[in-house]
Amino acid sequence: MQKAKRRENNTFRMAGLAALPAIFLVATGAHAQISLETAAGLALRNSPEVHMSAADVQQAKGALSETKDAYIPSFSLGSNIGYSYGFPLGEPSIYNVSGHSLVLSFSQRDYIRSANKAVSSAELALKDTRNKVLAKTAEDYIELDTDLKEIKAIDEQKSYADALTSIEQQRVQAGIDPRSAMLQAELTSAQLDLKRVHVQQDAALMRSSLAHLTGLKPSAFQPEASSIPPFPAPSVVHLNAARLADENPTVAAAKANAQSKFFLSMGDKRQIHRPLFTFGMQYSRFAEFNNYSEYFQHFQHNNFDAGVQITIPLFDPSGKAKAEQSAAQAVHAQAQAQQALDKVDENILKLGQSLTELRAQQHVAQLQSQLATAQLATVEQELKTGSGQPGASPVTPQQAQQAHIQERERYIDMLDADLNVARAELNLLRLTGGIESWLHSAPQK
């Protein structure tokens, strides 16, 4: 547990150091590129979900200390000073000091073990929350970077489409091409305008989401593509799905919670018919004006008592009902842990299968982009020097513009395929607990 706590503190420290440049940008109002690791560090510092999970850890640790401290005597100082007439009732004292502690309980050990497991469950839940925040930040960051690249490519497409429209207008006016050719060029230009609106809107949403995550202004957010680490090499996920699911923080937290509920039920069960030993002591200083000396032969002002109280439950229906309730909660928590394991196992298998298909689509998109680039180079070369083949039709300016448009379209398709793969990779890294190490694997400048 101490090692885990040190790792957690080191991670928070690294996140804070990584976030210093962005904090400086916010303070100065500057606009500059922000690395993915910096954005992730800010998201961890700014996330309400992380703060709530961290508070849950502190609460669980407080409960653990409470169960352990039951054996440590607690002391209190009080006073019952007051006037009495006739036979003194109660215990009017100037001041009194009392203390009590637990000596022996057959249930307390189980309660301590339950609290220990509750701390482990809360720490694992915090890790899972951190992984979710990191994955969300990385996904939005990569999507914003992709949107900006696509907007640039669409602008280039638009310039070629406008040039094509101008050419077709001149040819229609000259009576060379039909009007439908000009309308087709205008339609292509209008479709690119619509596509740019969609991508711009998505980029605005990503900026807003990243602003909420990191606390930065949306307008100040400029991603740095070189800070995105490469994803790990493809692995045979389906062969390790069971082990990876078992190591998932959500599953581990559910299992720790089930163990905590089990120990709690054992502690409640042992309270029914087993004795309880507690220690108690009290010192009181009695006043002279409460006429104790008139009714007690050997009255003295200083009084002290100490002893061990033994409580043996003979008939406790309320305790029995509580034990039955906690036993049912333990069974419920165990079923939840199994359900979480099955769900994560299935998700890892689905993601592994989906990644195989998405990587194949990515490879196709990459080849199509390379082919379009090669075809564009051929068209440009033939436009300058001719095809070099006798009787071959020369490349027209319209074909050159269309080749440029097609090359940019295939490039955008490749960006979309890369984004789909990145989303699946991030989900898999989150489920397998590798998102944080992946973020720190970015090359350092």
Image (cartoon, grey):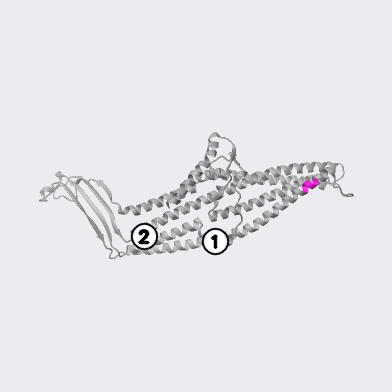
**As drawn, is 399 to the left or to the right of 273?**
right
At label 2, counting other C-alpha atoms closer than 10 Å, the crowd grade (few under 14, some 14-19, many 20 or more) is many
Of label 2 and label 1, which has the lower sequence position? 2
Q: Residue 264, percent across and down?
A: 38, 60
Q: What element carries label 2?
A: helix
Quadrant housing the C terminus: top right
User: 144 or 112, which is in the foreground?
Assistant: 112
Q: How far apart are marks 2 and 1 (CA)?
A: 31 Å
At label 1, counting other C-alpha atoms closer than 10 Å, the crowd grade (few under 14, some 14-19, many 20 or more) is many
* Disc number placed over residue 76 in the picture, else none: none
Q: Residue at x 62, y 60 (%)?
A: 353
**As drawn, is 41 to the left or to the right of 325?**
right
Magenta-highlighted residues: 375-379
Total marks placed: 2
Q: Residue 110, percent across and down?
A: 36, 60
User: 243 or 189, which is in the foreground?
Assistant: 243
Q: Is residue 402 visible?
A: no
Give the main secondary structure, helix, strand or loop, of the magenta stretch.
helix
Say whether residue 414 is magenta: no
Q: Residue at x 49, y 52 (%)?
A: 127
**Residue at the disc numbered 1:** 345
Q: On the image, which quarter does residue 168 sit in?
A: top right
Q: What residue type is labelled 2?
A: Asp
Q: Which residue is drawn at 54% across and 49% down?
A: 134
Position of 289 relative to 60 (above/below): above
Q: Which residue lies furthest to the right in this view?
A: 391
Q: Residue 202, percent across and down?
A: 63, 46
Q: What residue type is labelled 1?
A: Asp
**As drawn, is 125 to the left or to the right of 317?**
right
**Residue at the disc numbered 2:** 110
